[in-house]
Image (cartoon, helix red, strand yellow):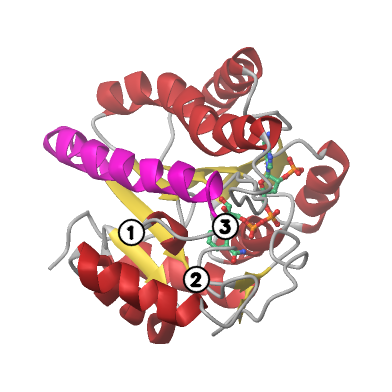
Amino acid sequence: MSFNSKLTQWQNKRVWLVGASTGIGEALARQLDQLGCRQMLSARSADKLATLAGELKNATALPLDITQLGAVKTAFDHLINAWGGIDLIVLMAGTYSEMSVEGFDIDKVCQQIDVNLNGTMYVLGNVLPKLLEQKSGHLAIVSSVAGYRGLPNSLAYGPTKAALINLAEALHLELKPHNVGVSVINPGFVDTPLTRKNTFPMPFLITAEKAAQEIIVGLEKGEFEIHFPKAFTRTLRTLRILPYSLYFAAVRKITANTKKPELGNE
Ligand SMILES: NC(=O)c1ccc[n+]([C@@H]2O[C@H](COP(=O)([O-])OP(=O)(O)OC[C@H]3O[C@@H](n4cnc5c(N)ncnc54)[C@H](OP(=O)(O)O)[C@@H]3O)[C@@H](O)[C@H]2O)c1
């Protein structure tokens, strides 16, 4: 079943990739460039974006801090002045730090909410009127399997990613009648600067290049939820639908012998 229009024709597609300076975003920018997309690349690191854009055929650096509403508006106005419209927005910007009850740090909690959730809302506030006016386009929101259900040591990151899954579902329901596509992207463990600080084993770890390929394939198929690697996410999707009695028991068993659990700390 196809939930969205299939994105099969990439040539000259106008893409705003927010969170493009490193990791999965950088890999996706490189692959979309190969497919012939026109891209505006955003993140805070202007130097990294300029270097990346310089290496690509059709990309422009558009630095911004997603937590600054004014900066998001200025960037989107610039993009619309340049292109007149937009075909695909990938909301990739995200931040993560482990958070347990013993290490609860309200500043780090607020920082993750600011980037992962509020930043996404700031982008939406700017792009939604344009998408509704166009009656076309596609929003891809990068969440995480850590957003499926509550996990230990994920008191800040997990809730932000759960909120993004909920948000994407609501957007999909509302935007479909307006001919605007919505996808939520739920990666497992991907080898990027975000996860390199993890000291625990990360099962089924994949490269950023593989993650970018999975995203492109999912968009080409018109999927709503794009999740990968399947060998890992199929298990987590089963845990997702268990009743609490079974879910809590399963997570306790999986995490019993690890000081830092293997799930949910990407
Ligand atoms: N790696 C994994 O295993 C994994 C698993 C599930 C989900 N994810 C999600 O995938 C997305 C990409 O993560 P990644 O693993 O590729 O990590 P990453 O390499 O750390 O990339 C994060 C991106 O977000 C940007 N960013 C962070 N704060 C920002 C801000 N305030 N304003 C604008 N841009 C900001 C970063 O650029 P600057 O620092 O230059 O601003 C960077 O481009 C994130 O949403 C993450 O939660 C990752």
Mark 3, secondary structure of its residue: loop
To which residue does mark 2 refer?
Answer: 188
Q: Residue at x 44, y 44 (%)?
A: 159
Please tell me whether residue 80 is drawn above or below residue 169 in the rendered image. above
Residue type pointed to by label 1: Leu
Residue numbers of the magenta segment: 153-181
Q: Where is residue 244 in the image (x, y as percent from the top left)?
A: 23, 63
To which residue does mark 3 refer?
Answer: 153
Residue furthest top in the image: 70
Which part of the image, by quadrant, shows the N terminus?
bottom left
Q: Which residue is drawn at 23% across and 31% down?
A: 135
Mark 2, secondary structure of its residue: loop
Q: Distance between the residues labelled 2 and 1?
A: 23 Å
Mark 1, secondary structure of its residue: loop
Q: Where is residue 249 in the image (x, y as percent from the top left)?
A: 32, 74
**Which of the two labelled residues, at mark 2 and mark 1, occupies the earlier sequence position?**
1
Residue 31 falls in which quadrant of the image? bottom right
Q: Distance between the residues labelled 3 and 1?
A: 37 Å
**Which of the two labelled residues, at mark 3 and mark 1, occupies the earlier sequence position?**
1
Please tell me whether residue 163 is drawn above or below residue 229 in the rendered image. above
Q: Please say if the residues under marks 2 and 1 sit with CB atoms less than 8 Å apart.
A: no
Classed neighbour count for the residue bearing mark 1: other residues with Cα under 10 Å, few (<14), some (14–19), many (≥20): many
Does 85 appear in magenta? Answer: no
Q: Residue at x 27, y 66 (%)?
A: 240
Q: Is mark 2 within 8 Å of ligand 1?
A: yes
